[in-house]
Image (cartoon, rainbow, N blue to C red):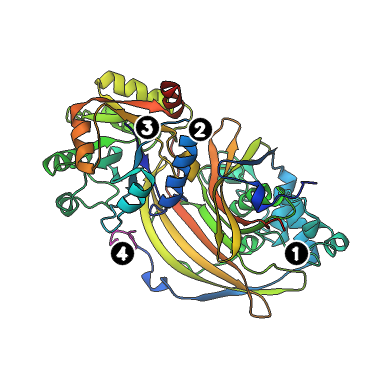
Amino acid sequence: MASAVYYDDVDLGDELPSMERQVSDYEVVEFLNIARIGEAKENRFTSAEAAKSEGLPEAIVPGAMNIAIMSTLITSWSPTVTLRKLDVVFRGMVLHNRPIKLTGLITDKDIVDGSPQLECDVVMENEEGTPLVIGKATVELPVRE
Amino acid sequence: MTTDDPDLKYDRSLLGVDHDIGTYDVTKEMIISFARSTGETGVQYLDEEAAKNTVYGGLVAPPTFCNMFVNGVSRPDIKLEFGNVGLFAGQSIENLTPARPGDTLSAKTRLKEVYAKTGRSGKMVFAVWETQFTNQGGDTVALVQESFVRRNRSTR
Amino acid sequence: MYLDLHTHSVSSDDSRANVEQYVKWIGVLRKKGHQIDGFVLTEHRKFDFDKDYSELGSENDVLILKGSELDTDLGHFLVYGVTEQLTQQVDFSDVDMDALKLIEIAENTGAVAIPAHPGRFGIGLTEFTGNGRDFSALRAAERFNGSNRPGEQERAEEFISQLGLRGTGGSDAHLVSAIGKCMTRFDGDIGSELDLVAQLKTGRFEPVWLDDTKQEQA
């Protein structure tokens, strides 16, 4: 389990612990089934053929799942962190079963309306280093007492 | 932006108009499946018993949980006359109140803007929607803004 | 003088960086020993006449200038020295405007228009070189771009070399921490958009990567 991080401990330019993972076919199906997004038997998220029929190279990971995976970079950083806002742009398709890397960097630090907040650049990139999802996270960390 | 671009053909009457898009019952199983499939490790998302000892006092949904619902909703058709492939282009989610098992979330959405630009795959048209999720107590759970792009199928 | 000639703030739909945060980040880069004197905001398909960053810039010793990145029939173009006269003659929201006409109008109104990321797939000038167009009006092109994907930098280098153009550098930052990734080093001093245009016309500049600014300082 990650150790507790406090607002006092961090500064601009600090990196969040990076993460590497792949998204499996099974995880995509499980995700889609939660809200019955994937009731159609074959679609761009589950079938390479269906994806290709739409001009996509292969089956892709749903956008809502990508942003959820991005948020784990923040939530797994520290049990003390609260993710207030995550704002991302999808710049490339995230494919199943391919290595992806998540990185984050603290770019701002301020007390906003009494709340100790950080802004972090967050990036999901493929194994070539091409950014697939980029964005900004607004997070809260507690101040040491 | 170019929401008023006369070359963009879509149903402009939808701009800024709220549409109820449904209610969603949040269950323990949904929260745990969501957390497991996306790689969450915090016990507040995965373990009902252990979650009782966290600051949340019980199981809560991961921060981007509401996105799952907007991904599956039927929105009003804006009748955009452009492109033959649609993709998710971007999204922001602001979390105001944690969603918990037993919550019933209601959502309303509105079309914010429509505009064109060019990118690696040629001309693209973006439609931006704003969606608000409210729980049964009237608290706003999340504010979601999504951007969808339509483009023509790549020939590359 | 080191300027990042290609940046986007939240005024562009696909950027998540605000100008104040760029300025703070430049402070971080300077603490690490990098040289960066300022940047040009080149928002997509618009020019923000109403935004004034001069106070923010002077308080932090950072030059903040404004330009634009426009979508044309020959890919994206960066425009420096935008005037009201230019915006009256060019519809900045037109995603298929005539690039050669843009270059001409820019020159006639005291501005300079150069191809952005010419090696980029889909929206770089190298995608449009086979149609017999005359590119002799080009003064320069963006040689270093911080957002290039694999292969795009090489395409840009080849194109610029073939045409014998001067090259600029810009990060194409859409996130705070991307600013300054590459820049343009000018021989002369620049304090305004007018100065920038004048320097671009002299040809006395070169693109640099951020790491190069540290080495030169040491």
Q: Is residue C24 visible?
A: yes
- Mark 3 → mark 2, Cα distance in angstroms: 16 Å
For mark 4, name the chain. B
- Residue B1 left/right relative to B35: left
Q: What amino acid is found at the position of numbered circle 3 in the picture?
A: Met
The lab-note entry on whether marks 3 and 2 share a chain reads yes
- Mark 4 → mark 3, Cα distance in angstroms: 36 Å
Query: Helix, strand or loop at disc 2?
Result: loop
Query: Helix, strand or loop at disc 1?
Result: loop
Which comes sooner in the sequence, label 1 or label 4?
4
Q: Is residue C99 above or below residue C119?
A: below
Which one is in front, B30 or C133? B30
- Where on the picture, by quarter, is residue B63? bottom right
> Which residue is label 1 attached to?
B60
> Which residue is label 3 attached to?
C183
What label sits on residue B4 in the rendered view?
A: 4
Between marks 2 and 4 in the image, the one whose residue lies nearer the viewer: 2
Determine whether label 1 and label 3 are within 8 Å by CB: no
